[in-house]
Each structure stands twice: as C-alpha cells, then as structure tokens.
Amino acid sequence: MSPPGKPRATTYRYNEKPVYTTSNGAPVKNPSTWQRVGPSGPLLLQDFHLIDQLAHFDRERIPERVVHAKGAGAYGEFEVTHDISDITTINMLLGVGKKTSLVTRFSTVGGEKGSADTARDPRGFAIKFYTQEGNWDWVFNNTPIFFLRDPVNFPIFIHTQKRNPQTNLKDATMFWDYLSTHQESIHQVMHLFSDRGTPYSYRHMNGYSGHTYKWIKPDGSFVYTQIHLKTDQGNKTFTNEQATKMAAENPDWSTQDLFDAIERREFPSWTVYVQTLTPAEAEKFKWNVFDLTKVWPQKDVPLRPFGKLTLNRNAENYFAEMEQAAFSPSHMIPGVEPSADPVLQARLFSYPDTHRHRLGVNYQQIPVNSPLHSFNPFQRDGAMAVNGNYGANPNYPSTSRPLTYKPEARGHETWAGEVVNDLFGEVKPEDYEQASGLWEVLGRTKGQQANFINNVAGHLSGARQDVRRRTYEMFSRVNKELGQAITAETEKIVHGNAELASKL
Ligand code: NDP
Ligand code: HEM
C-alpha cells in the first residue's frame, strides 16, 4: 500500500519511456504540432489535443488560501515517548513507542502565495495525523496566543493586515489603527515584533495550540489542555535587517531550507508537551481558559512531555500534496473535544467551509486528506467524487445492510444561560500583564528589547500621526519606559524621513 497522502503514481523512473497521450489516453504523434490548414493556415477546432491543453492550462489556478497562502510542508511521524494514559483516551496517544504517520504544512499568514517567507508575521504550524480512528488535525501557530478573543473580529482584523482597498498597498495606518483600537491584541503584538516574529526557518520555531481543548479521561471526566511543540533544532531568529535582506535575495528561503534539510536526511523534530487543568482548577484560575490572548504560565501549569514529531519525507508534488492539503480544527478523533473558546468554535465552521470553496465538496477524497479508514456511504455524489462513490451500498441507514455504530466517549459538560450578544471581554488593565511578562522575558537575552523597539519603530513610522499616538499609549501600558523608547525612536524616523523629503 502506498503511504498516506500519496496520490496514485503518475511519476515514472528516468529509465522508463512512457507513451505520451492526450488526457483521454490516446497516443499523440508530437506534442508540439497542431492541426492546421496547409503549412501556415488557420488552426482546426477539431484538434482535441491543442484545445484540451489550452483549456486545462486556463483552469490551472484554484483560489489561494484566504490566509496562510504561502507555505511549505513535509510528511513525518509522531511517536509517543511518555505514558499519559491517566489523562487521555485518545487512541493515538496510548502506548509508549506507538507511531502515527502525519503531514505538516507551515506558512506565513498575511501575504499572498508568492510573498516572502521571512515576512514579519505569525507562522502557521498545521499537522494532520493519519490515526486508526480518523484524521486528527492540529492547526496551530508559532505563537502561544492570538490577536483576538472574539471571532467576529477575524475578517476585519485580516483586512487591515492585507492591502488597502484603494492603493492595493500594505498600509501601516490600517495595520496600527486596528491594533491600537483593539488592545486585547497587545500580547500577540509583543510576540510579533520580537525577533521571534521573523523565525530563521520553519525548522527553528515552536508550535502552540493556543486554544484550550478538552481531553476525555478514562473515567469519563475531562481535562482542559494546551499543546506545545518545542523545536529540537533550537529557536533561531532573523533580525529585522536580516529578514528584509533575505526577502530580496531568496523570498522562498524557509521553503528551501525545509526541503533541503529533509533531502540531506537532517530530519527536523519537535518535542511535544501538554499543559492540563481540571474544570475545577479552570474555574479558579487567574485567567479565563477560553481567552485566546492569554497563556497558562508554566510555573503554575507545568509542561508535561509526551511525544516526538519528526519530519522525514518531502512531497513528490507540491500542488497535489501541499496546496490541496485541507486542515481543520474540527477534524477531531474520539477522546478530544473543543472547549467553549469562541474563536475555536468559529474556526470549527470556517475551515471546512473554505475547503468546500477552495477544493470542492469532496475535499476529503483528495489523497493527502483521505483518512486511513472511512466509510460514510450517506455522503454521495458532488463534484469530483473519485472514491468509487460507495458503489451499490445503500445511501441511507438501510435495514438490509446494517452498519456498525461505535459509542462515543463524551466529556460531561452542562451549559445553561440567557442568549446575549456582547463582546467576549472588554479590554482591562490585566490584558497588559502577560504582555509585560513577555517584555521581561525579552530582557533575559541581550539585545532583544532593543531589537523590539527598533522593529516596532520601523513599521509604526509609516502610520498616521493620531494612530501613532494611540499606539504609543498602548505600549506605555505594557511598560512606561517601553512606551517612551518607542515614541522617541518612531518620531526620530518620521522626522528623519520628513527632513530627507524636504531636501529632495
Ligand atoms: P516562563 O519563564 O516559564 O516561560 C517563558 C516562555 O517564553 C518559554 O516558553 C520560552 O519558550 C518563551 N520565550 C523565551 N524567549 C522568548 C521570546 N523571545 N519570545 C517569545 N517567547 C519566548 O514564563 P511564563 O510561562 O510565565 O510566561 C512568561 C511570558 O512568556 C508570557 O507572558 C508569554 O508571553 C511568554 N510565553 C509563555 C508561554 C506559555 O505557554 N506559558 C509560551 C511561550 C511564551 P522557549 O522555551 O521555547 O524558549
Ligand atoms: C488557515 C480562518 C484563527 C491557524 C486559515 C484559513 C482560514 C482560516 C479560512 C484558510 C484555510 C484553507 O484555505 O485551507 C480562521 C478564522 C480564525 C482563525 C476564521 C479565527 C476566528 C486562527 C488561529 C490559528 C490559526 C487562532 C492558530 C492557533 C491557521 C493555520 C492555517 C490557517 C495554521 C493554515 C493551514 C494550512 O497550512 O493549510 N484560517 N483562522 N488560525 N489558520 Fe486560521
């Protein structure tokens, strides 16, 4: 059997000479000739080969991902390294030494498909595990938190990080206007403008679930969890200047770095940890465990190691295996459930929705997305039903052909309350606390705080004056000296630029 994710072989060995044919399999005399009238007359519409080639070419592009359009990935495996059977019933995680195949895709967020890999941006860290009980997707980022905790803001937030509708340019005013008027984003802004906002490559960064999930325990109760993947290659970053230089010299740097390392058999790996809180602990916890802008401090909730993820095989065809890969936080397996985090709840809808738009209703039949075992004969037809469409099997729960239904373990949870239409949380003084904590973490490594100020000032200097002022106030709430330093550095650049412009 071919390994998971691998499409039907269409690649031939170099010493084979396959017969060239049309798309319907008929041999063609010469791919470069067209039927025409006489040596220089008009072309004939009856030439299927020519028309078919052009028509297929005309349809080569599918919509790029609306976010995370630029990316690269590889296949690998996950191995359980520690016994965690006391906190989980997820089959894939039971048994030290147990291995599961997987595919990953790393990405930047805001840029288009051809944009530079070294852009200052969070990085996507998506994994699809091909488990015996279905595909389990971890659709994570390289930051432990996110810009928002209220999902309704996601489309407008993304608009401000993309292009101005009139100029079609990236726009520093839009960028900071949103962030300074939605200051719950400050913690993520601190991550983004530290040097970890420009990782050296995909191999040298961590991955985080960010969201809280629920893991069902053997006794039917559950624990809240957060997952961390720490790079075994060591965290390594570019400075702003190095990242900008690399964007010009090799915009595909991270893509190439990952591919070449795997070809050299330098297989990158990550150590995987879990943080857990019982529902009772979560009730009493200082932070709302459904607030995506907050971490769980590691001294309060220690990291527990349980696995190792290693990448060891490149894709043979980028489009088939990476562009068509479809990850979703809603692709879960028995033993794991979403928490009530509203951003996670919204994502459960958004990803399969975009896959149906980007890849079609049968996106799960594309080899890279196909589970090891699946049997759902009640989903029939639709564009590109290429899995045999369940043949003559009944397309409803028929008494003539009974199926086996397995009971699901559910973590007991009760919710009751009034329907409200409010913000998930007003911005409060405690929203700056973990941002201040990160400012202190940056202070542990020489030069990191100075780089942070430089990274913000360079970008913020392009924004309108009132937006700059509001942003200075935002940073002052994290740390007074930080606010002052950013004000001074940014205004120096603004006035330097103005002086330069007046001399031209
Ligand atoms: P700890 O001192 O226990 O942990 C600090 C964490 O910060 C480590 O996970 C470390 O990751 C990470 N870190 C180190 N340098 C940087 C950097 N330049 N940029 C981003 N992260 C870095 O502290 P707490 O758990 O109390 O957290 C303090 C602050 O650290 C938080 O406010 C948060 O911003 C940040 N942080 C916290 C994480 C968490 O889950 N608690 C995870 C990541 C960051 P590594 O070991 O890989 O270097
Ligand atoms: C990609 C929506 C928040 C991680 C995407 C895509 C959409 C989307 C539509 C494109 C998917 C595709 O075309 O295949 C949203 C919405 C969010 C949100 C609506 C919040 C309301 C987040 C968060 C994380 C995240 C918080 C990380 C914790 C990713 C990753 C990808 C992605 C890694 C790329 C997956 C791949 O490589 O194919 N998101 N997202 N997103 N998102 Fe989100």
Image (spheres, rainbow, N blue to C red):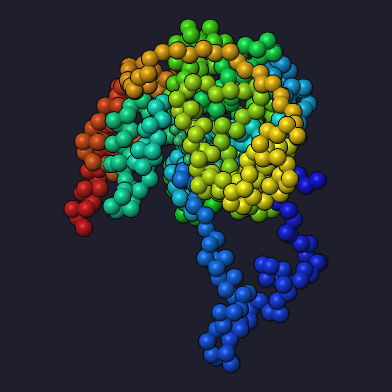
- Furthest residue in direction bottom, as rendered: 38
Q: Which residue sits at x=50%, y=47%? A: 357
Q: Nearer the viewer, residue 275 or 473?
A: 275
Report the residue that reaches farthest toward the front.
400
Which residue is located at x 74 percent, y 22 percent? 94
- Does residue 313 appear anywhere in the picture? no
Count of numbered labels shown in the rendering: 0
Residue 361: quadrant of the picture: top right
Q: Is 176 drawn above or below residue 498 in the view shown?
A: above
Residue 211, position as x, y percentages in the image: 51, 25
Front residue of this view, candidates 89 and 192? 89
Residue ID at (29%, 44%): 462
Image point (53%, 7%), residue name: 280
Q: Is residue 345 left or right of residue 463?
A: right
Quarter occupied by the C terminus: bottom left
Check the image and report above or below for 19 versus 314. below
